[in-house]
Amino acid sequence: MRAPSIDLLDPAYDADIHTAHRRARERSWYATTPMGIIVLRHAEVLGVLRDRRWREQGRDALESVGITSGPLWEWLGQIMATQEGEDHARLRRLVSQAFTPRQVERLRPMMRRTAHALLDAVIGDAGCEFVSAFAAPYPVHVIGELIGVPATDLDRFHGWCSDLSLAFGPGIASERERIESALGDLSDYVDALLAERRHVPGPDLTSALIEVEEQGDRLSAAELRAMVTVLIFGGQDTTQCQLACAISAFLDSPEQWRLLAERPALAASAAEEVLRYEPAGSGAPRVATEDLVVNGLEIPGGTVALPSGPAANRDPAVYPDPDRLDITRQHAEPQLTFGGGAHYCLGASLARAELQEALPILAGRLGEIGSAGPIEWRRRALIRGPVHLPLAFAGGPA
């Protein structure tokens, strides 16, 4: 049987990825695309993520548009996500000693204070543009507290991260100057922060990363810079998009929103369910390092595959009634928004905590919510989410 095809660059796909995934998944575990194949079923997506014969795409996307040098090329070659084998394992071991559950847990009271403060500014207006009012500033404040930067510097992060996010979409070549300018500004800031923390350590993650050591091995200056820039970018941009994705999902399921307001103890399962149902991450492309055979399909070495978290998360073989948002759902299998295998997202616990703290506060204080205008989504990007989400709300208990 001929495999289905999905044009990932078609605006119609962006407008409704879940219908495209469902139709193709009913026919096959994969579909062809202009860039390679997209893997659609939970078992096969998890298999690709765990199979060491697939590597992260890394710099391949830059090479495909003629970029083989420069700041962006160097940065993508240094970050942990593009390392493989022992190089990746070494970095992960070192970073995991600093980026601990304790680092995340210490931020929860601050997350709650930040959520309430942001809502205090808009709650009397009966409406807001949710991304600029909450989804963008909330994770910026959290990541700022995590890495140890003053609140007065936080506004700059949002602009840098928005520009840097263009490096993970199809416009890399045309937006290269803008991307590399943001990367340069962010790198300069991180260098100054690292120099300050070497002189005056604090309780923050930056200080912990500087101090971490294993059998005499430490992170180099370049590795530290790459790690902190990724933490700032990933901790801001991805969480911003995920919060906006969550609200867009609840707009279509008002009964689930009311349930969360009535039962804030469901915060953890609600966070897990929105991560499953409407994930911001589309998945990280992989490249076959050798010729493979998967389910009878011959895959030549060099083939690019997108193991799709959004598609796997709605596989009916794993999740009954997968197209229904249900914040009481029991997740017997792992939802794959954060990937899997050796490259499982290092910041997953932080993202979960941010959602767990923010969602019940939003539901309790905003009350009934509704759309106050068209929702504008980010297009043709690996990190999806509304960039403009006009929201009306009735207001709930203080």
Image (cartoon, rainbow, N blue to C red):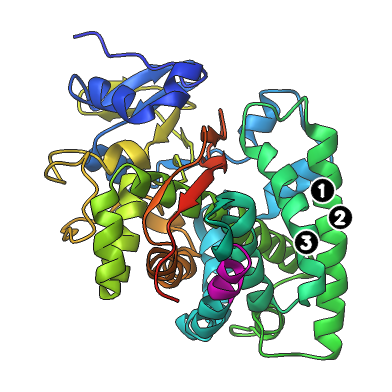
Q: Answer yes or no: is residue 168 visible.
A: yes
Q: Does residue 93 belong to the magenta stretch? A: no
Tell me how far mark 1 sits from mark 2, CA to CA.
5 Å
Residue linked to disc 3: 155
Residue at 75% in and 23% down:
66
Q: Are marks 2 and 3 in contact (CB under 8 Å)?
A: no
Residue linked to disc 2: 185
Q: Is residue 373 left or right of residue 312?
A: right
Q: Is residue 186 left or right of residue 255?
A: right
- Front-most of 60 and 205? 205
Instruction: Identify residue type, mark 3.
Output: Asp
Tell me how far mark 3 sits from mark 1, CA to CA.
13 Å
Residue at 76% in and 74% down:
151
Magenta stretch: give its range.
114-122
Looking at the image, is mark 3 or mark 1 nearer the viewer? 3
Q: Are marks 1 and 2 in contact (CB under 8 Å)?
A: yes
